Image (cartoon, grey):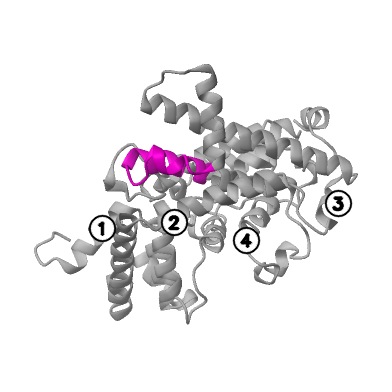
Amino acid sequence: MHVREDSTLAGYAMHSRDSRGRRHLEPESRFRTVFQRDRDRVIHSTAFRRLEYKTQVFVNHEGDHYRTRLTHTLEVAQVSRSIARALALNEDLVEAISLAHDLGHSPFGHAGEEALDQLMAGSGGFNHNRQSLRVVDCLEKRYPEFDGLNLSWEIRESIAKHGDLKRSEVAAEFEPDWQPLLEAQLTDLADSLAYSNHDIDDGLRSYFITLEDIREVSLWSEAERLVVETHSSLGPKTLVARTVSHLIDLQVTDLIESTFGRLRDRGIHSVEQVRKHPSKLVGFSEKMASLKHEMDQFLMERLYQHYRTLKMAEKAKRFVAEIFEEYLRNPKQLPPAFQDRIAQEGKARAICDYIAGMTDRFCQDEYKRLFHPFERV
């Protein structure tokens, strides 16, 4: 296993033999590296399966063809692995980080997250990155010897540093002064790349945005031009599908070339150099970063702030808030396992953990069970 890594990975890639290991010692596998085992543990977790019924942009019952948190996660893993292979990074590590990065997401996407953060304002707040770490460290119950999944330090560090968290918010355990591994930096950008491009697809499918709308975006126009150059008479669905594919390819190509050039120009040959570098090394060119920013601003204004999207979001926040307040009023309505957590975690955190683990449809059903008098409990 290690011989294969030695022959395929660059010096700046994270090798599995250099892992800091797990919190709880376990015998090594004969046939899988530590990161391959991490990936498999994530896939077999309850939290991973629940992602199938958690919102990306559109609430689960809005339709069968929209992205869910699970399909988004798989798309991030696919994009990440392609980029990792081109840069000679550790694909197994990238895949494990990608599959774990949204395990702590609440029901109803960012609307649910905002609601829980407000409700937990006096009790430490709520952030889906920190919740993902709670999931893999303590909330999953799959082993008799320990709580959680006992993932390697590098996966846990990557979860803790995912997104735009400030260094001051990273626990001392995860070396807040260190830059994330290149594999983690890559996953962050693949996450952003996947959701913005595929949200366009879902936005067009829902008719919340139109082709005329999105043609205002320079990056889309360039991708569509490349499609039309080779296929001049496509139907609307095929045109959108091929343009989204080209849109992703343009960004992935730029990300690979820009990152490789940055690593070369700055003489980066080791993980230690990555850790000590004053800034992140994985990134787009200035031109592509500007084009992507324009596209993201378009999505914010036309899709995420669309009046029907906001209606869904506000309804979701009410579901979460009213369920939270009802449990707070009488926590004996919680399942016994979460009642048991109150003494250790506090009432608010135990309730938050329970709600954060819900799928969209379970949360909607629980709302009915709590507040509709004729609903069977």
Q: If you read the primary sequence from the N terminus, does the residue marked by circle 1 or circle 4 appear first?
A: 4
- Which tag is nearer the camera, tag 1 or tag 4? 4
Q: Which residue is mark 4?
A: 164
Q: Which residue is mark 2?
A: 301
Give the left or right position of residue 301, taking residue 289 as reference. left
The one nearer the camera, 105 or 233, is: 233
| Spatial separation of the CA atoms under disc 1 and disc 4 | 30 Å
Specify the principal SS of the magenta part: helix
Q: Which residue shows up at 56% across the image and 63% down it?
A: 130
Q: If you read the primary sequence from the N terminus, does the residue marked by circle 2 or circle 1 appear first?
A: 2
Q: If you read the primary sequence from the N terminus, does the residue marked by circle 1 or circle 3 appear first?
A: 3
| Spatial separation of the CA atoms under disc 4 and disc 3 | 22 Å
Disc 1 marks which amino acid?
Gln
Where residue 270 sits, quadrant-wise, is: top right
Q: Which residue shows up at 41% across the image and 18% down it?
A: 233
Residue at the farthest right position? 267
- Label 3: state its secondary structure: helix
Instruction: Tell me the number on the disc at residue 364.
Output: 1
Disc 4 marks which amino acid?
Asp
Residue 348 counted in the magenta span? no
Residue 283 in sight in this render: no
- Pinpoint residue 323: horizontal percent, then vertical percent: 29, 69
Q: If you read the primary sequence from the N terminus, does the residue marked by circle 2 or circle 3 appear first?
A: 3
Span shown in magenta: 194-217
Q: Is 350 located above or below residue 238 in the figure? A: below
Where residue 313 sits, quadrant-wise, is: bottom left
